[in-house]
Image (cartoon, rainbow, N blue to C red):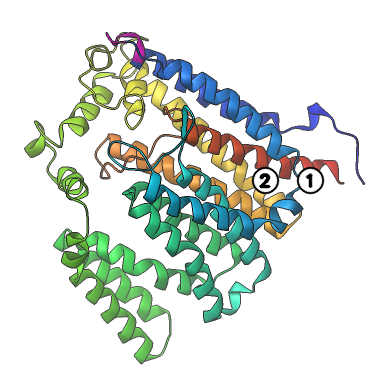
Amino acid sequence: MAREFSIRELDWYLISLVFILLIFGFLALYSAQVWVEEQSTDFQRQLLWFCFGIIAAITVFLIPTKMLFAFAYIFYGIAFFLLIAVLKIGVGKAAASWIRIGGMCFQPSEFAKIAIVIALARYLSQCKLHQNRLKDLIIIFLLIIPPTILIKKQPDLGTSLVLLFVNLPLLFWAGIQPFTLFVLVSPVLSVITSFKFNLFLLWMGIVAAVLYFSRKTLLVVVGLFLLNIAVGLITDKIWDHLEDYQKKRIEVMFKPLQYAKGSGYQVVQSVNAIGSGGFTGKGYLKGTQTKLKYLPMQNTDFIFSIIGEEFGFIGISIVLLVYFLLISRMVTIAVNAHERFESLLVIGFASVIGFHIIVNTAMTVNIMPVTGLPLPFLSYGGSFLVTLMTMIGIVLRIEYKRIKYY
C-alpha cells in the first residue's frame, strides 16, 4: 500500500554516512590547497560539483526504477558512444579521458560505470545464471569487455579494472555457481601471482586443491589446471602490452626504495606521511608532508595520506569504519529490495564504491600499484563526485520504495 511522500522516511543513516565522508574530504582538500603559493580553486570547484551532485541525486531519486530498467540498454549505448567519442575529441594531460563542453569537462568513463551496472543488473535479473548457460556468460562479457577496452585505450587502466571487477559481485549475487565463478576468477589471479614465483606456486597449489575437491571429471580438472599455468606463463606477453608508466608502477610496488627518487617518490612520501601521523595525527593543517608539498597528487590519488598525517590512526580508523558501514548498509538495502533488478543495482554500485576504496587505500601504503583511482567522497574530482551522488540517489530511491510500499 502506497503512502504519501515523507522526508522522514528517507534513509538518513545512509545519508549521514555519505556526509561524514564528504566532510572529511572537504577538510583534506582545504588542507591540500591552503599552503599552495599559486592560486588553487580545487576546494571551491569541489563545492560546486557537490551542488551538481545533490541535484543529480535528487533527480534520479524522482525517477522510478522501472524507467531505469526500461532504458538500461539505451543508457549503455549512450555510454559506449561517449567512450568512442572521447578517443577522438578527448582532452587531458596524462590521459585523454575528458570531453570539454563549453568551460566544463566531464569523464564519459564515470557515466559508463553507472550505465554498465544498470545494463548488467537488467540482464542478470532476467536470466537464470545458476543454470550455467554459456550464452548468458557470453552476453555478460560482451556487455563488459568492449567498454573496458575503450577505457583502457584512453589510457585509464584503473577505471577499466573497475568495470571488470564489478562483474564478479554481480555474478555472485545473481546466483552463479561458486565453481563457475572460481573458473572465471582463477586465470586473473594466476596472472597477478605470476609476478612472484613463490606466490605463483602457492596459488597453483590452491587451484589444484579446489579442482581436486570439485569432483569434476579428470578432463575438466586437468584442462583448467593447465589453463591457469598457461595464463601465468604468458604474463610476459601481457606485460609487453602495458604502458611504460604502468610497468613502472608495478615495479615500484615491489621495490619502492629503489625508485624513491623517481617513479616511486609519491608512494614513499605517502607511506611516510601516514606513518608520521602516529596515533592522533599532527593536527589539522599541521601536516609537514602536506604543508611542504612533499606529497604529489595529495588532493586526488593520495588524499588518504593527508587524513593519516593530520588525523593519525584515529582519523584513518574513523574513515575506514564509515566506509565499512556505508557498504554494509548498501548490502542490507540490496537484501531487502523488493525486486531482483533493484537488488542487483545496489550491489553493483556498492561494488564500484568498494573497489575504489580498497585500491586507493591499498596503493597509499604500497600494497597495490598506483592506478589513479580516487577515494570515494574524499578525492577531488567533479565527474566522480557527481557519479557517486547519482548512485546514492538511486539507492535511496530503492530503499524509499521498500518503505513506501508495505
- Residue at image x 52%, y 68%? 140
**184 or 124: nearer the eye?**
124
Determine if the magenta segment contains residue 34. yes
| Of 90 and 392, the residue lying toward us | 90
Look at the numbered discs 1 and 2 and tell me whether their residues touch, using CB distance below 8 Å: yes
Give amino acid for label 1: Arg
**Quarter of the image where one finds residue 315:** top left
Name the side, left or right, on which 279 lies relative to 61: left
Regarding residue 214, the answer to whether it shows in the image is yes
Q: What stretch is highlighted in magenta?
A: 33-38
Give x and y (percent) for residue 301: 33, 32
Pointer 1: what residue? Answer: 402
Q: Residue at x 34, y 54 (%)?
A: 152
The residue under label 2 is 333
Dot 1: few (<14), some (14–19), or many (≥20) neighbours within 10 Å? some
Q: Which of 404 and 220 is in front in this view?
A: 404
Q: In this view, does 277 lie above or below 349?
A: above
* Marks 1 and 2, the one that precedes in the sequence: 2
What residue is at 39 percent from the left and 26 percent from the top? 316
